[in-house]
Structure formats: structure tokens, C-alpha cells
Amino acid sequence: MDIEYVRSRFIKHFDGTTGSIYTSPGRINLIGEHTDYNGGFVFPGAINKGMIAEIKPNGTDKVRAYSIDLKDYIEFGLNEEDQPRTSWARYIFGVCREMIKLGVKVKGFNTAFAGDVPLGAGMSSSAALESTYAYALNDLFGENKIDKFTLAKVGQATEHNYCGVKCGIMDQFASVFGKKDSLIRLDCRNMEYQYYPFKPIGYKLVLIDSVVKHELASSAYNKRRQSCENVVNFIKKQYPHVEFLRDISFDMLNEAKGNISQEDYMRAQYIIEEIQRVRDVCKALDIEDYETVGKKMYETHYGMSKLYEVSCEELDFLNECAIQHGVTGSRIMGGGFGGCTINLVKDELYDTFIHETIDRYKHKFNCTPKIYDVIISDGSRKLV
Ligand code: GLA
């Protein structure tokens, strides 16, 4: 995806003049899934796929937005009652509204955008879109007074208030804070973070996209979150300091076992184990022990599939292929219900693993998985 392409569309669809161009990336996550809204740790990194938007204030109180990829144009106002019905436009509208709530004097603008983050593949195309506009509006209308954390929160609030997904902060954080060649360990309780240079010598990090779209997942996602809250609310009665599942030990969970549903118990068990796994992976990375990193990735897959139940037949099959090929680590990435697996593969195994997995997957599901080699890249920025 390139700037010139976006610019040529912008010129064609509006008045022939040009504006400023911004970009924000999608993300991967090495480990720490569904832990963000439980006050736990995550370990994402931004990738070399993202959204690019050209934007120019138009002197009116209307936003005129063109989705280059969907060839769809829409115009909307900036008041709460102007919310557009079209789903892609809601992200832009939501970001405008959240910036206005922060006191930024957002005015009308023309914009055209395009992206190469596959939609519904668990690589956070929506966060990339939100971060692009949050960053841009801060620059164009907010004198860059809003800090990067708040920009990430604008994206998250957009999901909550305008898109119906009660997501955590991981995706928007990774998109805004991404840094080339580094993963970021974020403590989602106090928002402390640390960059970890990540270039595992002798291994490749590769995503295999099941091409099962996870679009219908938002209600299931919110339901998982509800289960976590149910457990916290119950245990809190006994232990008032408990704010998140992060604060709960297995002893506390087992004490509560008879009073919470079996389902909620399983969800909480997964989260408590997953928070610990991120800690273990950090320790393993410190000594470049990629075998342990990989083992933890498999454990995450198992937990997401059997306890948190956010996998599907296709993702379990891809995971099984990885096990059979002796791949170091493999698991579902992102929210689940479709999308990609992330795989840590020894260089020498890479070609056979990829070719045979594609063949077997085609044979079983009659469709071709997509392969993405991961390049860890920078976060939100202005390009021109
Ligand atoms: C989605 C959400 C994130 C996070 C992941 C699962 O990507 O947007 O906040 O909860 O799922 O780890």
C-alpha cells in the first residue's frame, strides 16, 4: 500500500487539492490474549500493514469520507445525532466524537483512506483506522496536545461507544506506540510498558490466516468479558481489594467454585493462567529461550480453545499442523473465532511447514489460507 495511491484517490474524489497523510499499523500479539480487560499483561507489536489516510479540513461542519478499498463515499455531521449507519464510517465518526469530548475543536474535513491489514483476521484493522484518525485530528485540530495514551483510549472508547465491542486497550495501544523491531510488554492495570527488542535468530514469526472472518464475534467477545466480571464481582464480596481477575489466585477461584457457573470458572481459569504465561515468556525472552516461549504459545492455544472457547475447527486444525511439524510455538492470535494463528518456526522447518499446511488446509476446508511474514514496525505517524 502506498502514499501515492491514496493521494491520487484523494485528488480524484475531492477538489483536486491535497491534505496531510497519516498512517497507523495493525498489530500482532506474541502472548497475553484477553488479558487486557482483566488488568493483566499483553505482549503486542505493530506490524508493517496498516491504514493510510489523507485528510484536509474543508471549512464546513461536515466530514466527507471515501473508503478507497470499498469504493464507498459517505458524508456526516459531527453531532451525536449525526451518527452514520455504515459500519466503516462509524469508526471515523466515533473518533471525531471522542476527540470532541476531550475538548478538541474538530471541524469538517475531506478524507480518503485505504489499508492492507486484512479485515476480520485478528490483526486489528479497526484499531489501525481509529488510531490513524485520532492521531490526525490531534495534529490538525488539537495542536497535538493530547498524549499518546489518551489517543489510544480514544480508539478504545470508539469501539465501546460507537461499535458495540467492549474491547481492552491492547490493539489501540500497540498501534499508537509500536516501535520497529520491538515488542511491547504492557501492564494493562497501570499502563506501564517496556519495549523488548525482538529478532529471534534462527526463527521466523509467521501468521497463517484461516480466512474465517471473525465479524460475528463481537457479542461473543462481550460475553467472555461478562464472565470475567461475574467472577470478579463474586470474589470481591469476600476480598474487597479485588478489581480484576489479575488480583485473583487459584485458591480464591476454587473457594468460589460452588457459587459461580462452570463456564465462568473455566473462563477465569484461562485468564489467570494466561497472565502468568506472559510473565513466563518475558523471563524466557530475557535468556533467549525460544523453546519455552513456544511451549507457552501452545498452552495459550489450548486454553483459548478448551477453556475460553474462542477457537474454531479451522484454527485448531492449523495448530495441529504446527504440532505435527515440530513447530516451536503456535496459537490463535487476537480475539479468536477466526482470523490467524501466530507461529514461531525454526528457519529450517519453515518451507515444508508452510507448503504442507497450505495443502492440507485446502484439502480439508476447500479454501486457501493466507501467509503473512511478520515485520515489526513503527506506530502512528504523519507521513506527509
Ligand atoms: C481483541 C480486542 C483486544 C483484546 C484481544 C484479545 O483484539 O480488541 O482488546 O482483548 O481481542 O486479546
Image (cartoon, rainbow, N blue to C red):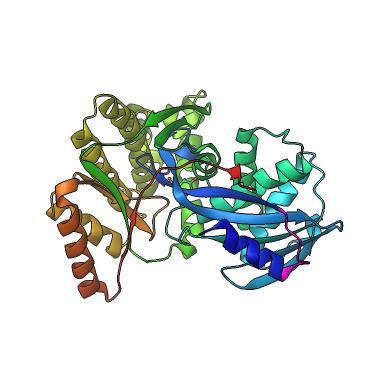
Q: Is residue 273 above or below residue 217?
A: above
Q: Nearer the viewer, residue 45 or 199?
A: 199
Q: Is residue 166 visible?
A: no
Residue 38 visible in image: yes
Whether 176 is drawn above or below 120: the answer is above
Asked whether residue 381 is drawn in magenta, I would say no
Front residue of 214/24: it is: 24
The magenta-colored residue range is 13-19
From what the image shows, is residue 138 above or below residue 110? above
User: Is 14 positioned to the left or the right of 52 in the image?
Assistant: right
Q: Nearer the viewer, residue 311 or 64?
A: 64
- Which residue appears at 51% of the width and 36% of the height? 233
Q: Position of residue 144 (x, y in %)?
A: 72, 36
Q: Indicate left or right for 325 with 369 as reference.
A: left
Question: In the rendered image, which quarter is residue 198 located in?
Answer: top left
Q: Residue at x 31, y 34 (%)?
A: 277
Q: Residue at x 37, y 45 (%)?
A: 267
